[in-house]
Image (cartoon, coloured by chain):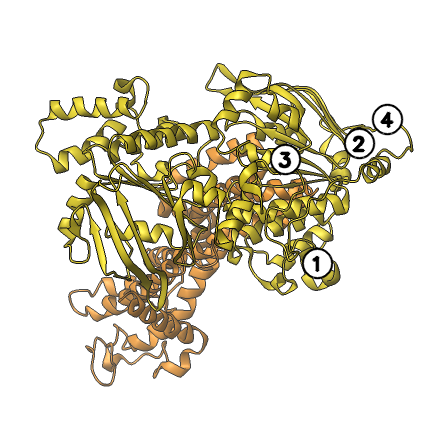
Amino acid sequence: MNEQQAIVEVKNLSVSFGGSKVVKDVSFTVRAGECLALVGESGSGKSVTARSLLGLAGPGSTVTAETLTVAGQDGRSLSQRSWRTLRGKEVGFILQDALTSLDPLRTVGKEIDDSLRLHTRASGATRATRVMELLEAVGLDDPERRAGQRSGELSGGMRQRALIAAAIALDPQLIIADEPTTALDATIAASIMDLLGTLRQAGSGVLLISHDLAAVAKVADTIAVMQAGHIVERGTRDQIFHDPQHPYTRALLAAVPAGKPRFVKLSPTEEASSQVHTRDSEQKVTAAEDAGGEAGAVVRPVLSARKLSKSFAKGKHATFMAIKDVSFELLPGRTLGVVGESGSGKTTTARIVLGLLAPDAGAVELFDEPWSSAREVDRRSRRSQLGAIYQDPLSSFDPRLSVGSLLADAVSFGATRNPRSHAARITELLQMVGLDAEMSGRNPATLSGGQRQRLAIARALAPQPRVLICDEPVSALDVSVQAQVLDLLDELQQRLGLSYVFISHDLSVVRHMSDDVLVMRAGQVVESGATERIFTSPRHDYTRALLAASPLVGTQESGGGL
Amino acid sequence: MRQLFRVLAAVVLLFFILAAIAPNLLAPFDPLAIDPAAAFSSPSAGHVLGTDESGRDIYSRIIHGARPSLLIGAMATAIGLGIALVLGTIAGFGGRWLDFGIGRILEVLFALPGLLLALVFIALAGPGVTTTVIAVGITAAPGYARIIRGQILTLRSSPMVEAATVLGRSRFHVLRVHILPNALAPIGVLATLGLGQAILWAASLSFLGLGSPPPTPEWGAMLSAGRTYLSLAWWMTFFPGMAIVLVAAAATVLGRSTKFGGVR
């Protein structure tokens, strides 16, 4: 492979904005037919690095490098005009958010045709044929129809494929993909990665950027780990996964929840080694007795759903069955994982359980009392038993309220938003979730993603609930931050004897967090049972397909030796 | 450049607000003092903006006119917002049928030109400053009501309200504590923009002789009075007109520049 010509050669690349250097002395090469992955947390400089290869480092940036060769051109001295030619012809760029990258008013065919029209002299008919070829090459069904559709009519995976089609329209030597699968469901993400793998085999160089080591494992030949603007470690895929040298690489690997048993810490702790907190079975029974109220009796579920169904009107006459006959039980102190792709009815189920939506049929009981059938007025006093955290915590906060005010409101059951009135309890809550008590005066918008989710957890815990519904609580977070939040949820569960309903599209996260799992597809439960049973011997075809698509599940044991 | 406009607008507005609070500080003459000998003098060192048909100093009249003109604008905006708040909240929070009913009423009000609506009200209630204020307020209300309703509808289905419901808050509590304060943040900005419009409308009504009675130094009334002598003494119309334009433009510039303040 070393015989292959280098498409990108970067030596000591530095990028700074104003006074602050965000990329520091980064060097790497990408050869034809090779895939290099840049992995790091948000803010590690990986996107800026990729963008400087396109002359798009951003306004106010200063790019310096000893060597910056892209497709045979010296990137240090290119004019805007030459950059544009380079971008269209030699380098294809794929962004994370395909929805905003495509013009909603133009058809997909026109979008793809753009690069052909601007960079070649081909006739309209030739171009139209080429567009069809491209759509087929990226695996879109029925290319003729797809070419006439607009981005709003396509699903997330199809959009990403269309974007890839536009990026590879002119057979670029290099493809840069910035978090191409982060917003996608597992099976779709896997197929996009496969597509990138195919392009690599066809001879393109691929530069892949991601915050998730597991996500790049399938296609990357070489992985470079970035932290705070530096490449701290680089190596072949096997080296990085099986023999990581740098502590940061190890932390990133440890943060991958795949294959880690329950209660193993994912984030680095002060203790020398991560400890396996095996659950004391006696303690569990005690917690169960507390909840059930009777010693020695059968453990009663804290929350149970029987044959929930809900449909929504879709157009004038059609209805859309969001969920059908969903049943489950949540036992005290346990976690029920709900896994499925977008549109599988996970969130509808959560909304019914939270009493935000009335089911068409079926019933939810909370602590053996009717819940979904009760009137909201009667339900209100019992709401403190049931808390919730969401995927986007910030949007669930009143934007006018500071951290302290939000918690004061939750602690006082809405009576006051003055943080001074419950200062001691607010401090206690903030410390419980690992936030600084001094943050009380800040606006949640100024917090980082992980801090916001911690605040959401603190608010949910303020009324001292027994059950917490977690709807995709870590989906928007970097892997390393996700690890910290998952660890926090684990710790709180053990300390407070909480029961969780944990909803996620990410199988490895669900496996790590849950005692029991519910696999949902198209509104129905296709399989349910104990977590290990589901993951080791899945019975339903769909569960098997999900497992196969999920990166690294089951193969991570060897890499987990920290 | 934009910064410069903002500073200029603030200076203009502050000047007229000062004029409204303490006109004697800025005006050299009594706005009502008649001096027939000096009638129709063009702008000069003695009368910087000239005099009118009775020899009254135009500059002093504009300064003294700031109070009624600004007050009418501000009061009318306040009344418009008040009506809009009630209608918008009921429409946005009262359920489908109330929303439907209020929506149709607002559409009828929208269908009529604003000034015509104000004229109809004045025709019914009789001319005068109070009726002008109420008329302009009613005219401005549908626009605000629409926006408040939209804000409330958006906020009602927001994750923030859902979270409050999960925490066990009642509908009324959510409306009072979370929805209304957030819905009103952008309305404050709109009100600044609307202030300029309200002043224009009030001036128009005075121009038609339906607002402040002569010889009150009100800008619209001054325009109206000067109209007859436009070919003889252009300054009688030009300078009061400039005052209206300056205030309306300044309020608009400031309103726009604070557009994103307070809203995330």
Please state the horizontal and vertical placement of residue A330, each as a whole percent of the image.
Answer: 73, 30
Q: Which residue is mark 3?
A: A502
Q: Mark 4 or mark 3: which comes first in sequence? A: 4
Quadrant of the rendered image containing residue A391: top right
Q: Which chain is orange?
A: B
| Helix, strand or loop under label 2 | loop
- Which is more N-terminal, label 1 or label 3? 1
- Ranked by sequence position, the earlier of labels 2 and 1 is 2
The correct choice, above or below, for A327 with respect to B92 in the image is: above
* x and y, in percent, of residue A324 in the image: 61, 17
The residue wearing badge 1 is A426
The tag earlier along the polypeptide, 3 or 2, is: 2
Q: Amino acid at mark 3?
A: Phe
The three-letter code of the residue at mark 4 reads Val
Instruction: Name the residue carrying label 4.
Output: A298
> Residue A117: where, in percent of width, then height?
14, 34
Q: Nearer the viewer, mark 3 or mark 1?
A: 3
Question: Residue B221's image quarter?
Answer: bottom left
Helix, strand or loop at disc 4?
A: loop
